[in-house]
Amino acid sequence: MFSVLAGRLVYLMVFQSDYYSEKAKELHERERSIKAARGRILDANGTVIADNKTVCTISVIHNQIKEPDKIVEVLSKELDLSEEYVRKRVEKYSAIERIKSNVEKEKGDAIRAYNLEGVKVDEDYKRCYPYGSLASKVLGFTGGDNQGIIGLEVKYEEYLKGEEGTILTVTDARGVELDAAGEERIEPVAGNDLYISLDMNIQSYATQLARQVMETKEAERVSILVMNPQNGEIMAMVDVPEFDLNNPYNLPEDIAEEEITEEKKQELLNAMWRNGCINDTYEPGSTFKIITAAAGLEGGVVHPEDQFSCPGYIMVEDRRIRCHKVAGHGAENFVQATMNSCNQVFIKLKTCDMRFFLSKKANACSLLETGA
C-alpha cells in the first residue's frame, strides 16, 4: 500500500507537476482588467474630433477589507453615492465588486490617497469629443464600457476598441494579497486611429447655415450633405438639431423627463440620435437637375450657350407645369437656367435626353439587324 501511495505521489508531483502548478496559480491569482485606449477619430485635416481622457474605476475586494465602515464613509462622500448603496457592495462576498466607473482622475487620486486596504483604484479611459455636438450623428458615441453605440463609433468598433490588459495579483487561501509576490501586468493594446474624409471647417460652416435655415423657415429639422464631386468623399454631413456627444442621454430642455416613461424616453433618444441624411428617404427635387444637366451636356443635346425662354410654365401633354418663379425667368441661356434652377428648361432638356437615348438605342438595334 505504501508503494502504491509513493508511486501515486511521484506521478502527481513529477509527471503532473505542470498541470497542478497552473491550477494552483489560477486559484491564487486575482485578475483586474485594464481598459485599452480607444483609437482616436481624426478629420481630413488631421484634427482630433474624438479623443480619450483618463478616468478611474473604483472597486473593492471583500477579503482584503479591514475597515468597512471607514470605506463606506469615504466612498459615499467622495463618489457622491448613498451609504446604503456603497455598503451593499462593500459587504457583498465576491472576488471583486465595482463601486463606480468613469470617475474623474482627480477624484480617483483623492481616494487612492486614503490608502484604504481592499479598495482598488484602476485607471481607465473615457471617450471625449472636443467639438461637442458638431457632427454628432456622424461620429456617434460610446457606452459605459467604452463600446460604440451609434455612428462611426459602432461601425468601426473592431478597429477602434483595442485589446484590454490585465493586472494579476497573488493571494493566499483567504483571498488576501501577498505583498511579497507583487503583481504582474499584461499591458493593453491601444485601438487604431480612424481618419475620415469629414472636414470640420466645412462641417462647422454647414451646421451654421442649417441652423439659420431652421430658424428662418421654422423647420423641424434641416439636412446638408457636402460631397467632393471628384471622388465622392463626404466632406460634411449635417442633420440639425444635433445633440451633445459628451452627454448623449440628455433630452432637449423643452422635454420634462420626469413626466415620461422609460419606453417613451428611449423612443425620443432614438429619434434624437437618428441621422436623417442616411436613414430617411426624400424626393430629390431640384438636386436631381445636376444629373439631367450632366447627361444633356455629355450627350450633346444641349450646350452652355443654347437660348431658352421661360414664360413661367410649360405644357406637357394636357398638364400645365409651372416654374417655381411664377412670372417666369424670361430669356436665358443654359448656364443661366441652371443657376435659376428653371423647371421649364429642365423639363425640355429631360425630353431631349430621352429622345436622344431612344435614337441611340434605335441606331444600335439597326446595326445589330444589319450584322455590323
Image (cartoon, rainbow, N blue to C red):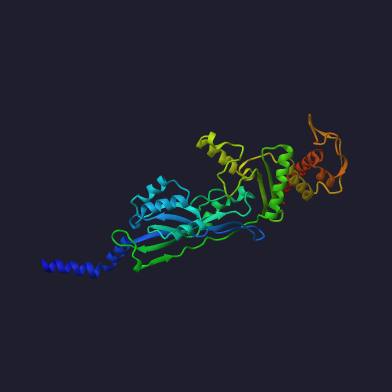
Q: Quadrant of residue 116?
A: bottom left
Front one among 259 and 149: 259
- How many badges with numbers are in the image? 0
In the image, farthest residue toward the top: 318
Q: Which residue is drawn at the image coordinates 40% and 53% (left, top)?
A: 71
Say which residue appears at 11% left-offset and 68% top-offset. 2
Q: Residue furthest left?
A: 1
Residue 33 position within the rendered picture, expressed as x and y whole percent measured from the top left: 43, 59
Quarter of the picture containing the N terminus is bottom left
The answer to whether one can see residue 142 in this image is yes
Q: Residue at x 69, y 39 (%)?
A: 283
Q: Does residue 254 sit above or below 9 in this rendering?
A: above
**In this view, which residue lies farthest toward the right?**
331
Q: Name the side, left or right, on which 223 lies relative to 70.
A: right
- Relative height, residue 167 to residue 312 (above, below): below
Residue 37 locus on image (x, y percent): 52, 60
Q: Is 354 positioned to the left or the right of 113 in the image? A: right
Left or right position of 144 against 45: left
Which one is in front, 114 or 192?
Answer: 114
Up the image or down, 187 lies above or below 152; here it is: below
Q: Is residue 34 visible?
A: no
In the rendered image, residue 233, in percent from the top left (x then y), is placed at: 67, 54
* Front residue (pair 253, 161): 253
Question: Where does residue 271 sit, x and y in percent of width and height?
Answer: 58, 40
